[in-house]
Structures are given as C-alpha cells and as structure tokens.
Image: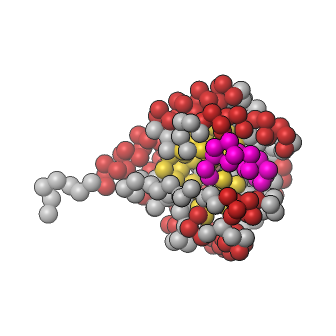
C-alpha cells in the first residue's frame, strides 16, 4: 500500500486504539475486542483517517507482554477495524506485525524504528507497506535513564537518519518511511518542548513526520505545579494546542486519543490558511 497523503496540507488524524490493560492514558478502557471495536467505530465517526492498534503499553517503566498475549490482544481488533478504516499496527515485534498485516493492517508503526526486532525491517520490506520509524533509545522499563542529549533536535535527527539508512539498506523504499520524534520516549519535558518547537528541522529531513504528543505527561505539567498536574484525560485541550503548532510546521500526521478535539483544531488551522477576502 502507498503512504496515505494528507489532503490540502492538513495532517492525517491517527486515532489510538490501545488494547492494553495498562497504557498511561486509557489503559483498560478498550481491552476487550468488543470495546476496542466500538471505540474504533467512534473514532472513525469523529473523523479519524487511520486507526493505530497497539497491544503493548510503552509508558515509562512498563514490562513487556509475551508475544502470544500481544497477538491475542491485537489480531481480532485489527481484523474487525480494517473493515472500517485503514489500520496501522503499533508493535515492536515482526511476528505481531506479520499477523496484523495478514488480518488487514496496511501500515506498521514501530516505536523502536526497527531496533527492537532484527526481523522487523526485512518483514516490512517484503510486505511493501509504509513504516513509521520512531526515535527510540531502549525499552520502557529503563528508557528515561537514556534521556541524555547535547542538542536534542540535532541528536534525534542524526539518530533517525541512521535508522533511515539501515531501513533502506534492508529494502524499505525511502518514500515509505515516516519519521517520528518519539515524544516522551527517553525524553524529559524540556526535550519534548524543544522537539516540538523545532519540528521544522525534522520535517526538513524530507520524510513525512508523525507526532505523538497526545495526553503525554509533559502536557500535564505545563503551567502547573506537581500538586496540580492535569490527569491524562484532562490533557486534550493541551494536545489540541500542540496539534495546531505541528500542523503549521508541516507534520504529516498526529497520533491522538481524542479525535473530535483534534479535528476541531485542524479545522481552525485550515480556516486560518484561507486567503482573506477582499484583501489585495
Ligand atoms: N506513543 C505511544 C505509543 N505509540 N507511536 C508513535 N509513532 N509515536 C508515539 O509518540 C507513540 C506511539 C505512547 O502513547 P500511548 O500509550 O498513549 O499509546
């Protein structure tokens, strides 16, 4: 499948369907196939262009599920949701990606950018599907100890470029590779802000750029003290503000939990782009 294209410069809205008991913002909410299917249907009705199905929580400190368990979580959901919308599979395991592609997924979203499983890049090359390579420095259990950067944007750009080189060497066409700065993955709040501020430098690498800021901890803290931090479900307005920003800097897509507020925010960006009537 070819990479979905944003229409009129408007980023694609990728709705999150986490089939996990423990994701930080919606863990447990859509854990049964029926609940996940109902949620996916709602996200499509709200305007999601794609649905991203994942069966492994990557919140800081999380332990990994066994492969069998991850397969059990995602395959029935991918199968059901692919009838409604294009589905991406959020996994670091080639075996899970293969089963999800067989079940109807058309894009692979790997938060490790192919680093966690040496079989991932060859599989994606063979299946000829688009691949999201996120910036990653290690599994969630201890990733925050790797949040060590000189210039975070330059370091992330360099490490993503190295990923592109390895992935294209494995046979994935460069045009099929989407890059993602990996907000919150081995990053402290100041790193996430700097990556958002200078997202144009990542867009300049020449690949579509996906941004996943939705409900992340740094948005809970902004303007607050540790005592008054926003809970994950209270972060959708802050998420929408980042969506407006990255849309203006040329993001290809945004991965979000709340599709309705994201679509509203993007409608505003689009309205502001229209030329002023009556003006020279
Ligand atoms: N974040 C999470 C999971 N998958 N995939 C991409 N490409 N980018 C992200 O930022 C990203 C991701 C963690 O968030 P969740 O637990 O709410 O799904």
Residue found 31% across the figure and 55% down from its top: 273
Q: Position of residue 98 (x, y in %)?
A: 74, 50
Camera-side residue of 161 and 129: 129
Is residue 196 within the magenta segment? no
Image quadrant assignment for residue 210? bottom right
Is residue 99 within the magenta segment? yes
Residue found 46% across the figure and 38% down from its top: 47
Q: Is residue 130 left or right of residue 57?
A: left
Residue found 50% across the figure and 41% down from its top: 48
Above or below residue 143? Residue 148 is below
Give the quarter of the figure containing the N terminus: bottom right
Above or below residue 216? Residue 130 is below
Residue 165: tell me if it is visible: yes
Camera-side residue of 125 and 225: 125
Query: Which scheme is used to colour this image of the protein?
Result: secondary structure
Residue found 78% across the figure and 62% down from its top: 115
Q: Is residue 270 left or right of residue 137?
A: left
Camera-side residue of 229 and 279: 279
Q: Position of residue 224 (x, y in %)?
A: 59, 42
Image quadrant assignment for residue 248? bottom left
Residue 230: tell me if it is visible: no
Above or below residue 62? Residue 125 is below
Q: Which residues are magenta?
A: 92-107
Q: Position of residue 134 (x, y in %)?
A: 67, 59
Give the quarter of the figure containing the C terminus: bottom left
| Count of numbered marks | 0
Q: Position of residue 53 (x, y in %)?
A: 66, 41
Camera-side residue of 187 and 59: 59
């Amino acid at each position: 499948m070819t990479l979905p294209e944003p229409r009129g410069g408007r980023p694609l809205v990728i709705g999150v369907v986490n089939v996990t008991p423990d994701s930080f913002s919606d863990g447990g909410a859509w854990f049964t196939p029926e609940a996940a299917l109902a949620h996916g249907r709602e996200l499509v009705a709200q305007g999601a262009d794609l649905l991203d199905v994942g069966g492994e929580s990557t919140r800081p400190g999380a332990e990994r599920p066994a492969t069998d368990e991850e397969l059990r979580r995602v395959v029935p959901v991918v199968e059901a949701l692919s009838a409604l919308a294009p589905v991406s599979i959020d996994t670091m395991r080639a075996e899970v990606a293969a089963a999800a592609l067989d079940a109807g997924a058309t894009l692979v979203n790997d938060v490790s950018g192919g680093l966690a499983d040496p079989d991932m890049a060859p599989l994606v090359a063979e299946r000829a599907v688009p691949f999201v390579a996120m910036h990653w420095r290690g599994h969630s259990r201890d990733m925050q100890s790797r949040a060590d950067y000189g210039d975070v944007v330059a370091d992330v750009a360099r490490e993503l470029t190295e990923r592109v080189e390895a992935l294209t060497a494995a046979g994935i066409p460069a045009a099929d590779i989407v890059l993602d700065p990996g907000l919150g993955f081995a990053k402290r709040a100041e790193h996430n802000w700097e990556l958002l501020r200078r997202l144009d430098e990542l867009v300049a690498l020449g690949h579509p750029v996906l941004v996943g800021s939705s409900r992340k901890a740094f948005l809970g803290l902004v303007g607050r003290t540790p005592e008054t931090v926003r809970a994950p479900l209270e972060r959708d307005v802050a998420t929408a503000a980042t969506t407006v920003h990255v849309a203006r800097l040329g993001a290809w897509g945004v991965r979000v939990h709340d599709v309705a507020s994201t679509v509203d925010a993007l409608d505003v960006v689009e309205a502001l782009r229209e030329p002023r009537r009556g003006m020279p």
